[in-house]
Image (cartoon, rainbow, N blue to C red):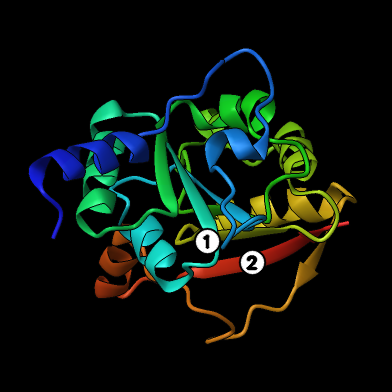
């Protein structure tokens, strides 16, 4: 068990603050390579919320590194606290606006997977333009992934799912990949547990960058 001082140090390490906000980061600036893990794949959870999915995923895949993007500082701090308490050294949370991080900060070609799970569907027609999955966002994600990197998407909102997947397919820079049950360890998010408890259908899609 960690002492209070050790817990505080680990917690601080898990709340990531980039060295600069106006240039593209290198992967090693987020997670320092070690002799045991010289080139661990980096995965990014866009809008990690309470962090339950992110932390469970990091626990299931200790050979990989995980960065959660979260706009609200309180939530990012909570994720860092929980990571420290669970002794997860392969996960960090960054308090930032996700589209800005994806476009300007994250390492180009340095991300193995992007997770976009249950983003705000902006259900009113007049607000649909605010939906995250747009052609520009597809190009931004593609720059991060490089060839073969994966984008995993889930939502309970049928109309948004149809629209978003049509945009991704129409971009011409991703190909759809099968995502069978049990293909790999993939925990439920807090929203997913809630929606499943209400009997809603969860829609999901997996794409690889061309």
Q: Is residue 142 left or right of residue 100?
A: right
Outermost residue on the top side: it is 22
Q: In the rendering, which numbered label is found on residue 72?
A: none
Viewer can see residue 13? yes
Viewer can see residue 114? no
Note whether 184 is above or below 86 in the view shown.
Answer: below
In which quadrant is the C terminus drawn? bottom right
At x 9% / y 43%, what residue is drawn? 4
Q: Nearer the viewer, residue 184 or 201?
A: 184
At x 63% / y 26%, what residue is drawn? 105
Give the residue at mark 1: 154
At x 82% / y 49%, what residue is drawn? 146
In which quadrant is the N terminus drawn? bottom left
How many neighbours does mark 2 have within 10 angstroms: few (below 14), some (14-19), or many (20 or more)?
Answer: some
At x 87% / y 50%, what residue is drawn? 173
Give the residue at mark 2: 205
Note whether 41 is above or below 177 in the view shown.
Answer: above
Q: Nearer the viewer, residue 5 or 31?
A: 5
**First in sequence: mark 1 or mark 2?**
1
Note whether 120 is above or below 206 in the view shown.
Answer: above
Q: Is residue 128 left or right of residue 134?
A: left
Q: Kindly indicate whether the residue at mark 2 contacts the one at mark 1 (C-beta within 8 angstroms).
A: yes
Q: Secondary structure at mark 2?
A: strand
Residue 83 percent across, percent down from the top left: 29, 52
Q: Secondary structure at mark 1?
A: strand
Residue 33 percent across, percent down from the top left: 59, 48
């Amino acid at each position: 068990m960690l002492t209070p001082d050790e817990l505080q140090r680990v917690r601080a390490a898990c709340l990531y603050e980039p060295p600069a906000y106006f240039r593209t980061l290198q992967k090693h600036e987020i997670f320092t390579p070690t002799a045991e893990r010289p080139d661990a794949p980096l995965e990014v959870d866009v809008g990690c919320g309470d962090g339950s999915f992110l932390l469970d995923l990091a626990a299931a895949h200790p050979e990989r590194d995980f960065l959660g993007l979260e706009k609200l500082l309180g939530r990012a701090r909570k994720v860092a606290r929980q990571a420290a308490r669970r002794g997860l050294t392969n996960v960090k949370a960054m308090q930032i606006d996700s589209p800005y991080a994806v476009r300007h900060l994250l390492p180009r070609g340095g991300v193995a997977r992007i997770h976009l799970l249950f983003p705000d569907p902006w259900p009113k027609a007049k607000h649909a333009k605010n939906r995250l999955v747009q052609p520009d966002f597809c190009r931004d994600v593609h720059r991060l992934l490089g060839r073969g990197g994966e984008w995993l998407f889930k939502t309970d909102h049928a109309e948004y799912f149809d629209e978003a997947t049509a945009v991704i397919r129409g971009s011409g820079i991703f190909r759809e990949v099968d995502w069978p049950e049990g293909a790999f360890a993939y925990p439920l998010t807090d929203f997913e547990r809630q929606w499943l408890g209400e009997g809603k259908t969860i829609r999901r899609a997996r794409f690889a960058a061309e």
